[in-house]
Amino acid sequence: MKPFENDTIQQATPQQNKDVYSKPIKLWEPEAVSFLSLLLTPIFGTILHAINWNKLKNNEMLLLNLAAMVGYFIVLSVASSFATYLLYYHTLETHIDFRQTTLIFTHLVAWFVWHRFLASTQIKLLKEQKMLYIKRNLWIPILIIAGIPLLFAIAFVIWLTTVVF
């Protein structure tokens, strides 16, 4: 009897023996991470999914998630440059903020592509294998990703008060 029903899932999982997963490992909840990354950024999801793939000992999916993170930066930069080019050199007269709309649309498309092709693989793997794992607390990464802009804002206010006054 094969432990895998689907060949694509079989390629994504490490070869299991009885000693590898004898006790549950700690993983970030992949489905929760995926939907939180819609709100935060796909970078949040790719990093946490890459950590999960590292714990599952699948280097190929780890590298694909890290490549998706780099690709997100590149796609967002190209979309921002394109929107800025259209706004300033073709003087688009619109009632909506074209640049912001372009960036939000790009973010949603990038999230959908990442979720469909990479995140769903990990979600399906854990559901189909009925793998036991301990859910790690997501508050720490959320506080980190929310705290970074807060630290920049505090640093800016400190710099502003020292330079201006």
Image: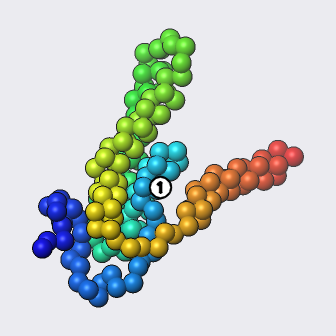
**Which residue position is annotated with label 1?**
32
**Mark 1 Cα-neighbour bin, 10 Å: few <14, some 14–19, many ≥20:** few
Residue that protrudes farthest toward the top in the picture: 93
The number of callouts visible is 1
| Quadrant hosting residue 110 | top left
| Rendered residue at 49%/23% (across/down) | 98
Q: Secondary structure at mark 1?
A: helix
Q: Amino acid at mark 1?
A: Ala
| Rendered residue at 42%/21% (across/down) | 86
The answer to whether residue 130 shows anywhere in this view is: yes
Where, quadrant-wise, is the N terminus in this rendering? bottom left
| Rendered residue at 65%/57% (across/down) | 147
Q: Residue 59: give x, y in percent of width and height.
A: 27, 70
Q: Nearer the viewer, residue 91 or 137?
A: 137
| Quadrant hosting residue 95 | top right
| Rendered residue at 23%/65% (across/down) | 12
Q: Residue 6: give x, y in percent of width and height.
A: 16, 60
128 relative to 154, above or below: below
